[in-house]
Image (cartoon, grey):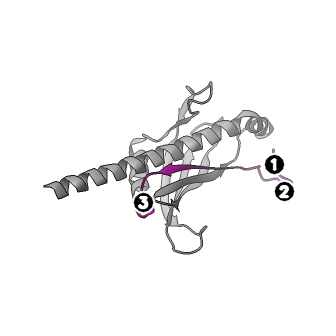
Amino acid sequence: MAQNDGTPRTTHIAVEALAICPFSMAADYATEYLRDAEKHGIEAGMGLSGRFPLSLLRHRVALAFGIHSDLHEQGRSHDELRIHWSSGSRLLPDFHGSVRFRIDANRTRVRVEGSYVPPLGFAGRMFDLTAGNVIARSSMQDLADRIAAYLTMREARWRTEQTAAVAK
């Protein structure tokens, strides 16, 4: 389905997850994670989380990202990670978005937001309105949760290493 000017309708999604990681390290750790995912494809399996009956349906996608200045928050400048994944299928949409980090006390809020154009015209738009958006939101939440878990694990590992180094 197209908007009045003939351009396809875009669906926007934003999700968040919390990481036990200082804000000052979040972008560096997330960059490590996404570089590995881009290179080895570990993050590329996107699908429904276990909260839905169809959670076994998964589709591997090609993930790419880049580091840019975050222009969405006033004050101190910092980076955002722009992401793109290509589904490699006419039946599934490609996604364009960003990963941003916000201070949340001694934690970091990981925000994944972006958009996609449902494929297959009117039929795809109707599917998106009934189920596709739920699948897409679940996939985005899965990505945010994975990044937050990696940030938490990476910070815990660094702290353990620092404690061991001091103990020597």
Percent from the top left, x then y, of residue 129? 77, 38
Q: Which residue is mark 2?
A: 5
Q: Which numbered marker is on residue 68?
A: none
Give the residue type that dot 1 points to. Ala
Q: Which residue is mark 3?
A: 22
Was residue 21 drawn as part of the magenta stretch in this picture? Answer: yes
Secondary structure of residue under mark 1? loop
CA neighbours of label 1 inside 10 A, class few (<14), some (14 to 19), many (20+): few
Mark in the foreground, 1 or 3 = 3
N-terminal of the pair, mark 1 or mark 3, is 1
Q: Is residue 157 left or right of residue 117?
A: left
Q: Earlier in the sequence, mark 2 or mark 3?
A: 2
Q: Residues at badges 1 and 2 in contact (C-beta under 8 Å)?
A: yes
Q: Position of residue 9 (x, y in %)?
A: 77, 49
> Distance from label 2 to label 3 (Cα)?
45 Å
Cα–Cα span, label 1 and label 3: 43 Å
| Horizontal and vertical percent position of residue 86 | 56, 44
Mark 2, other Cα within 10 Å: few <14 / some 14–19 / many ≥20: few
Q: Which residue is mark 1?
A: 2
Q: Determine whether, in the image, residue 105 is placed left or right of residue 157.
A: right
In the figure, 61 relative to 9: above or below?
Answer: above
* Badge 2 amino acid: Asp
